[in-house]
Image (tube, rainbow, N blue to C red):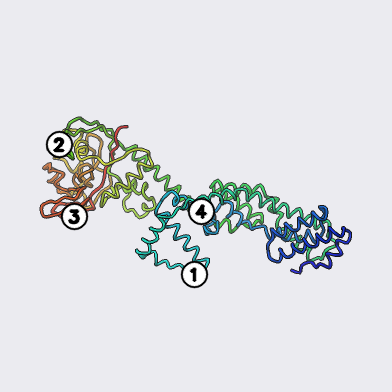
Amino acid sequence: MKLFTLVSFFILFTSISTAQSSLAKIEYSYAEEAYRAKNYIKTIKHLEEVKSLLGGETNGLVMYLEIMSRNHQRVSLYQILQNSVGVDLGDISDKNADLEDVNLINKASSGDSEAKFQLIIKLTRAQYNKQGLKFDENMLKNEVFVKHVKKIADTMNFERLKQTSNLIKKGNESSINKWLASNIKIDELCASYLKNFENDVPLEKLKQIYEIKKEIRPFIENKDLLTKAWSLIAEKKYEIAYIKFNELNAIGINSKTVLNKLKPVIEKNKVKEEALKAQEKAIKNIEENMVLVKGEASVSEAIDVNGNTVLESIPDLHVSKFELTQLAYWSVIDVNRLKVSTCKTCPITFPSRNYIDTFLEKLNKATGKKYRLPTKEEWYWFATGGRKTTDEKRGINEEKADNISKYAWHSKNSNGKRQKVGLKEPNELGLYDVWGNLSEYTTTSAVGGAFNTLKKRFNSGDDYTDLYKVNNEKKSLGKRKVFSLSIIGVGENKDDKKLGIRLVRDIE
């Protein structure tokens, strides 16, 4: 674009005093220089000084340059959305942190080692991109590299980055109103220019200003809808915001980029909401299926850590009617895994206590309660209907021993696989599958028969602990060494596919 010449400027200011005119010409030349350098903020600053020197008056040249500068300075609809609420995934180092980045920064600053590592890698990728280089993703498979980065990450303080992130977010909360105000200002300047200089400026410039006014006008006419749409995003009401931006798009305010960026955010939130609902439903189901089992004092003897004999008592307990199912487990841990689950109401199996501990930790955090595994003594107590069983055998109940198929899945009726919970009859306390389906973990052992247990073992009242033994501490068994959480199955074969859990909770 051809800019104004100083010749025309001299003619324009012939009526101004010589001193003011000279200073105004100098300031205007500074404004032109800043405009050519694309420093629009500086241009406007110089133009304001020109108007001040002219006693607050303006003219076509000054107004034209101000309109063009303000229009160049005005960012796009999508940019203001990104800067205001951070929907887009931006470069943290460029201060375009999105919602995920902010969460990552917060986690890292709170000491989360994995978040620190991920943040370091994210910043490294961004730095590579800035320099036009490609980050080698294979490095993340290199154990030495990963270990080195994690070591660096653990020593870094991310608090400053968190503070910067918060300042960016706070600083941009008012940017929507500022953006709308800048549009209104340009619209007013355009209206004044078209009215006052219509016959004095070239048609080309008149057309430019007219087009700018046409572009800006819809934003002003629909400022309430724009403000509402953005406020909904700031409130994280993305689905309603999507509807509002669709309305804007329909009336000619191009919001396609915004809509495209909102789609994955909405989908991600839907997944989170569904997962939360599934978790809440699973937890409610767990709670509703707990049975109150009355305990008894001094039911057996045990040896404490000092080798002293102590009397074990059974407290009153809430005990789950069912073995923990795949549905309940994955709804708490990762609901997406349910999509590949072959039998949601079958009991879940655990290869080690680590998985159980993770589940219990997450369940207790979600509920604020203390679910746990039963002790071996507690398990024997409720498995045998709340009766004293010094010999730890099922044979005390002759009716069940003679009709075991009514109560248990075993090798003759299970088709060699675990079955859905609750299909057989419960014991006297209303507990299902305590005699079959899966053996169950306690705090020290895995007890109870499984779906491949021989029927005669049930009928004979064989000792549960002969079927499976789980040891929490390293110790020697003859020539064999049983390590933590290892499982010794029938015939000395390891078997990690027949062990489930039944939740208990102490009376509060």
Q: In this orientation, which residue lies closer to the viewer: 220 or 37?
A: 37
Q: Which callout, 2 or 1, points at the residue further toward the start of the chain?
A: 1
Q: Which callout, 3 or 1, points at the residue further toward the start of the chain?
A: 1
Query: Separation of disc 2 and disc 1 at Cα?
Result: 68 Å
Residue labelled with disc 2? 308
- The residue type indicated by label 4 comes to Val
Residue labelled with disc 3? 494
Q: Quadrant of residue 443?
A: top left
Residue labelled with disc 4? 265
Q: Residue at x 50, y 51 (%)?
A: 162
Q: Is 327 situated left or right of 47 in this image?
A: left
Q: In this orientation, which residue lies closer to the viewer: 305 or 201?
A: 305
Classify mark 2: residues with Cα within 10 Å, few (<14), some (14-19) or many (20+).
few
Q: What x and y, as percent, mark residue 400?
A: 16, 38
- The residue type indicated by label 2 comes to Asn
Query: Separation of disc 4 and disc 2 at Cα?
Result: 60 Å
